[in-house]
Image (tube, helix red, strand yellow):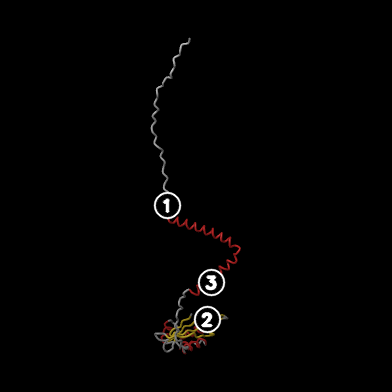
Amino acid sequence: MEEPREQQYPVARPQVAPPNYPVQPPPYYMPWPPAAQPSRRQIIRRTLRLLLRRSFYWATIIGQALRPFAGFVVVIVALLGLVGWLGFQLWWPKADAPAFQHADLLPPDSEIERFIKGQQNFDANVMWDTFSSAYQADQLENNTSQEKYQAKVDSQRQQGFHFVRYDYVGGVKLDEGGAVYFYTVDVEKSNQRAKLAYIFTADDKGKIVKITLH
């Protein structure tokens, strides 16, 4: 007979404590920088850009829709522009027209008429006699005597000058005395013609005190 075997029990192993690992700190993540706020100028620029794009978009759509009626649209726009311009001309306030006060015009002066005849005839003696004594003195101070005045007139005749026509424009009295007379003169030389403007200033006696040529 077999001897009964003793029941074998597993040998208990001693429990070993798990290794003690150091606690790792959680990873550190750099925070994202705050988003930069757009400036007012950038906001306006973006808004204008968006509006411009929208305008082009709707203009394209409207243009495609109105393409079959392009001629009719052009006529309507032209008529509206014409009506607007006429309304502007009709109702827009206009500046008051400047008020002009016409002076009492004088008849031609006899001494100046004598000067004109002397100039047409190249007669410096007649022209010199129409000058006032003060104007004659001024001519002498400027080294222009009666003889030199005649030489100047003779030179004009030799050069072919012709005083063809005199038109009297008008005359106006001066507050300090005397008057001013305006003439236009047609002068010819060698088939060339020019229109000159003469302004005669006369004293109270009608004698010439100044001649201005334009």
Q: Nearer the viewer, mark 3 or mark 1?
A: 3
Residue reaching furthest top? 1
Disc 2 or 3, which lies upstream in sequence?
A: 3
Q: Which residue is mark 2?
A: 195
Q: Position of residue 182 (x, y in %)?
A: 47, 84
Q: Position of residue 42 (x, y in %)?
A: 45, 55
Q: Is residue 201 above or below residue 20?
A: below
Residue behind mark 3: 83
Q: Look at the numbered discs 3 and 1 and tell me whether their residues touch, using CB distance below 8 Å.
A: no
Q: Secondary structure at mark 1?
A: loop
Residue count near mark 3 (Cα–Cα under 10 Å), binned few <14, some 14–19, many ≥20:
few
Q: Quadrant of residue 71?
A: bottom right
Q: Quick one: label 3 or label 1, which is nearer the N terminus? A: 1
Judging from the image, what secondary structure is the residue with disc 3 in?
Answer: helix
SS of the residue under disc 2: strand
Q: Residues within 10 Å of mark 1 (few under 14, many from 20)?
A: few
What's the residue at 58%, 61% (across, down)? Answer: 65
Real-space CA distance between mark 2 and mark 1, rounded to the nearest whole angstrom: 76 Å
Q: Give the labeled residue for mark 1.
A: 37
Marks 2 and 1: CB-CB under 8 Å?
no
Q: Position of residue 97 (x, y in %)?
A: 46, 78
